[in-house]
Image (cartoon, rainbow, N blue to C red):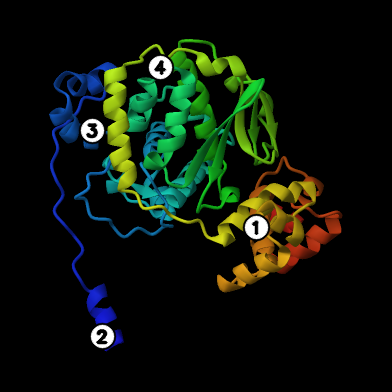
Amino acid sequence: MAAIAKVKLGARDRQSATRSFPNVKREGQINATGDIALFGRPCYRDALPTLPGIVPMARAARKQPSSTRRCAGVLSRVAYEYARRRGVVVAPLLEKAGLTQKEIDSPNLRIGVVNQIKFVGFVAAALGDELLGFHLVDGFEFGAIGLLYYVAASAETLGAALNRVARYIKIQNDGLRFEVLPKKNSIHLRLHYTGVPRYTDVHQIGSMIALMIRIGRHLTGSTLKPTVARIIHHIHHGKSELEKLLDAKVEDGARVDEIELPAASWNLPIVSADSHLHDLCVQACEEALARRRPKESSLKVKVENATAALLPHGQARHDLVAAELGMSPRTLTRRLAAEGVSFAEILKEVREALAKRYIADRTLPISQIAWLLGYAEVSGFTRAFQRWTGIVPSAARAQH
């Protein structure tokens, strides 16, 4: 009987009619939010859900070929147009990433974070652009971000805006966590991946870092200058270009993804501050947040992210990863076993995936790849790569 009940439950029709909302102008903060500020709550209730990243409550969840983490898909749509204008045939890349043309054409459809990471990576490969994520931010229309942008743009100070973004970022992308860490002489703006392996991404994180800097300058009307930008993945070439692009020192291969700002930046006034609009946006954000159920990241993903960060330092060991996650090695082993995986399997998976990415970059010496993957000797990496793929690294590189 239990089996029959499960079959019936799985066969239920879960589709529901979507609501219609009046269109909202999106040419900038003043136009996009003028009606909200003018007419107050009645307009706000109908208009705000049409902003990018806010999905009406009545919209039924659609089955997606991805992880359960979702995002507004703004970056995917920007990457699509960027590639199309440069003559890239985009349809095969969409299909390969598990996305559809409808998802690109419909701003209110949320997409899988994993799908977005894959698609932007495919576009970068097609264009041969290691810094694509950073380049996509050039000419970016901030209003396309939707409610998350407006709640920051209407705050009184940069510090207040950053705190709002930290609280509400999951409305835009629930595979990201944003942490604001004010210190005596600096402010650290740190990005964490949740439920998504960080090592699989190069370009989404680049866009997030570049956006934080550009939006900070735009909102404060200043030449906001970070002290340093730290990035977990390695930048194999173009680092000097990136430092010019961000106007900041860049530390790649870092333990965290973060921007460090001078402490004085905290009290910089926001030029578009609007207390009435801010209150409306905060209430809309709180309602949107309440509709999002908390999603616990699997331990496997947490181990993957910790392992990838420790690899280049030669510290991707079972005991050190356990300490990084605040548990004993025995507890880590037991909890991973409950998920049907072992630390050794995760380490192999992360190393193999990164090795294949690095091998495709001909500017990266095999010896440096071995170091990046935590091998003390090139011979150790060569033997491991041959076990994974059946060929040695030099032969694999010759195929690219």
Q: Secondary structure at mark 2?
A: helix
Amino acid carrying mark 1 in the image = Val
**Front position among marks 1 and 4:** 4
**Mark found first going from the N terminus, 1 or 3:** 3
Question: Residue 72 in the image: x percent, y percent?
Answer: 35, 41
Q: CA distance from mark 2 to mark 3?
A: 43 Å
**Mark found first going from the N terminus, 4 or 3:** 3
Q: Which of the numbered marks, if any, corresponds to residue 4?
A: 2
Task: Residue under label 4, please give it.
Answer: 156
- Looking at the rendered image, the quarter that the N terminus falls into is bottom left
Task: Residue under label 1, please give it.
Answer: 350
**Front position among marks 1 and 3:** 3
Can residue 391 be seen here? The reply is no
**Mark found first going from the N terminus, 2 or 4:** 2
Q: Secondary structure at mark 4?
A: loop
Does the CB distance between marks 1 and 3 fall below 8 Å? no
Does the CB distance between marks 2 and 1 fall below 8 Å? no
Would residue 30 be found to the left or right of residue 263 on screen?
A: left
Q: CA distance from mark 1 to mark 3?
A: 41 Å
Would residue 261 be found to the left or right of residue 19 on screen?
A: right
Can residue 341 be seen here? The reply is yes
344 shown above or below 182: below
